[in-house]
Amino acid sequence: MNTDKPEIIRLIYPQWQGGNIAGLVPELSEEDASKGYTLGAHLLNFLAPETKNKTITIPVSDEIKRVEENGIIGYKQILEQTRTAIQILNKSNPNKIVTLGGECSVSVVPFTYLANKYKDTAMIWIDAHPDITLPEDKTYNGYHAMAAAAIMGKGDKNIISELPAAINPEKILFVGLRDWEREQIKYRQQEYGIKHLTPQETSNNSDKILNWIKSTDAKHIVIHFDMDVLEPDEIIPAVGVVPNGMKIKEVIRVINDISKEYDITGLTVAEPMPRIAIKLRNMLVQLPLMV
């Protein structure tokens, strides 16, 4: 056994370019809203339990100006950061990855890396949205809404060609889904054959999720936890505030129930938008003797 290779790494992935969400967070400036994902990633790392495992931070550009190319805003930075993340993972060669983001696309590289390492991988995508927009849709240019599609190998050819593997739609389950945003996405999900469970279907137990995993014959599981899946009456940690979401205790129970039965190789926590922390930071920088 090569002891130089960590079994588990914590990947801090503060990518923000994939979100085009300034209009959805009107109480913040465009820059604060856009880069809120970066602060959110580092805040998640600060709040998470200390780990003895190696922690790696993916370098992310802080240039606020983003150009849309090939139907994706911030395309150049996202492509470059994707290549960097793949190089880092290939060099580190972890067996398991905990990713703290960042917008939803931070799962793309670690999950396809793990799908290449473990061929019998299934993906649980815990999210209010299915994230299967394609660049050619010309409806929304944020890459974070294209993340699940990219993991399936669908989307921009240059980005997809960099990814080490793809996960078949038959091995993907959306959990907590309640907002398709437009009918096109609902039809696309049906076309791909991706099954989903609503928050109500998982509110009492995880049986339907575990039965679905069993039907796939998968032995390794990657889990994406987008915090906008949570019920906004309980907490608003993300941009999305669609009602009738999952409770915190329900998400915790689902993930732990899966862990008891299967080998979780990848876990992502994504889409933090720490509104209060951003406002506090902006307050502090205006006070004397602070810098």
Image (cartoon, rainbow, N blue to C red):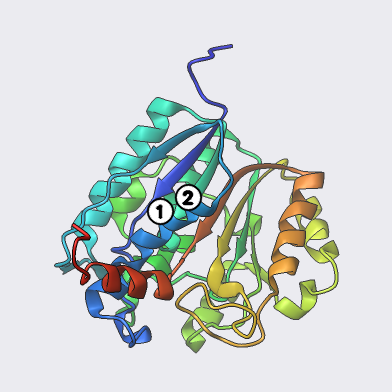
- Kindly identify the residue that appears in the image at 60 percent across and 62 percent down: 125
Q: Position of residue 9 (x, y in %)?
A: 51, 35
Q: Residue furthest top?
A: 1
What is the C-alpha distance between the residues marked 1 and 2? 5 Å
Asked whether 70 or 5 is in front, the reply is 5
Q: Position of residue 6 (x, y in %)?
A: 52, 25
> Which disc is residue 247 wearing?
none
The vertical placement of 276 against 166, above or below, is: below
Figure quadrant of the C terminus: bottom left
The vertical placement of 99 against 31, above or below, is: above
Q: Residues within 10 Å of mark 1 (few under 14, many from 20)?
A: some
- Kindly identify the residue that appears in the image at 81 percent across and 46 percent down: 260
Report which residue position mark 2 lands on.
45
Asked whether 212 or 48 is in front, the reply is 48
Q: Amino acid at mark 2?
A: Asn
Indicate the secondary structure of the residue bearing disc 1: helix
Q: Position of residue 60 (x, y in %)?
A: 27, 51
